Amino acid sequence: MLNTQDILETIEMIETDHLDIRTITMGISLLDCSSSDGNVFCKKIYDKITKKAENLVKVGEEIEKQYGIPIINKRIAVTPISIAGGSLKYDDFIKAAKTLDKAAEATGVNFIGGYSALVQKGSTPAEDSLIDSIPEAIASTKAVCSSVNVATTKAGINMDAVAKMGHVIKKTAYLTREQDSFGAAKIVVFANAPDDNPFMAGAFHGVGEGDTVINVGVSGPGVVRSALAKAKGANLAEVAEIIKRTAFKITRVGQLVAREASQRLNVPFGIVDLSLAPTPAIGDSVARILEEMGLECCGAYGTTAALALLNDAVKKGGVMASSQVGGLSGAFIPVSEDEGMIHAADCGCLTLEKLEAMTAVCSVGLDMIAIPGDTDADIISAMIADEISIGVVNFKTTAVRVIPAYGKTVGDKISFGGLWGEAPIMKINTASPSVFIKRGGRIPAPIQSLKN
């Protein structure tokens, strides 16, 4: 039970330290909407989504008002469309994307995820068609987000899919060039994608989930940094303990919101994702937490160790606060969405190579990174392959969300506004990996996957 001090601390977290519920995400299964007729499929998915989520935004706003807890986004995640629409062709998938967009508009949610394919070991004709359609689907919609899982620790890496995704990202960036290639920010390439992730752009409703579910994603980098600022001189074991206690409090807020939303919507409560998701706002940065530990600038030597401590302590504190923790859960390092990361990249302290090293211990991977628009598609594929390999070998979720900004080069910036932020165009290694990427095939699963 919360005591008076707990309540006062929570109010302070909200008012001064940017504590918020980043998202309430309703997962909706579309498996019962399958049809070989694209028009029938689209009608079924529209009707189901709008019926199941008709009160999602309203309930979120009621909880926000009653408890005074900011809930930034209300979102929907659906069964991967390549599975739910398994016999559809290219044109029908485009119709489905536009239908998802209309359903998002009708329900009032910020984003809808699940324009997705799971191709870690191979792909069906439907999955190939969906992947081919991603650039047009993203460019012709506002709220739709897409993800492709190209690897798992058990299956290895589907390098044919990796090679294709470099071209998909490049084409999407071109089609949305008038918006600083924003479309690429709504595409995620995964290894070991979770079924219950509430965060965009990678959210989808896994096939092992129930018909509907409520998942909540919390945030609070500013809260953690504020707690550490009050503990000058603490050793690193004490720092870890402070982060654990703070993560516990943040996750309890998320658990409260999740259970309230579940009860009011009459939808089962799934998980709380206790990730520290930053924003471009001053005081809401994961990078600044690392600097509070004693680094002059994020990206300095020691950054990976500090991030490993942070990620581990967040998870330990969160799992004590809720028995239903899932999704990604840890610390995000999206460059464009983190004020401290933007600063570190601007001053040259944070490089792409250092970011890759950090992804071995963070929650996701190379996230919201802007690169020159003329970057070859094979280089993008190779960046994906490197990052995905980290996830496969280490039994963790990793992902790539890079933005080849059309017409931009190193020294330029792109700006999306809101939670998406802005990013400097980062320097990349331009040595060609084309022969390697064009070999195709599958990188076998690592030996550590054989655990049975």
Image (cartoon, rainbow, N blue to C red):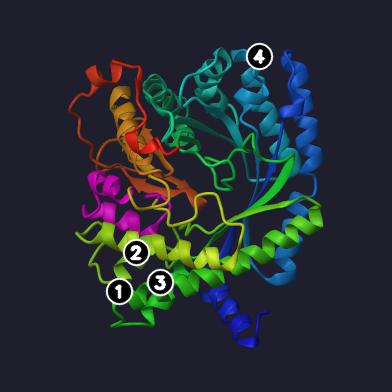
Residue in the picture at 57% in, 72% down: 14
Determine if the magenta segment contains residue 336: yes
CB atoms of marks 1 and 2 within 8 Å: yes
Instruction: Name the kind of residue labelled 3 in the image.
Output: Arg
Q: Earlier in the sequence, mark 4 or mark 1?
A: 4
Residue in the picture at 36% in, 47% down: 423
Residue 236's tag is 1
Instruction: Name the kind of residue labelled 4 in the image.
Output: Ser
**Real-space CA distance between mark 3 and mark 4, rounded to the nearest whole angstrom:** 50 Å
Q: Earlier in the sequence, mark 1 or mark 2?
A: 1
Residue under pointer 4: 87
Determine if the magenta segment contains residue 320: no
**Real-space CA distance between mark 2 and mark 4, rounded to the nearest whole angstrom:** 46 Å
In the displayed structure, does residue 143 sit left or right of residue 223? Answer: right
Instruction: Name the kind of residue labelled 1 in the image.
Output: Leu
Q: Earlier in the sequence, mark 3 or mark 1?
A: 3
Residue 281 x/y as whole percent: 45, 62
Residue under pointer 3: 225
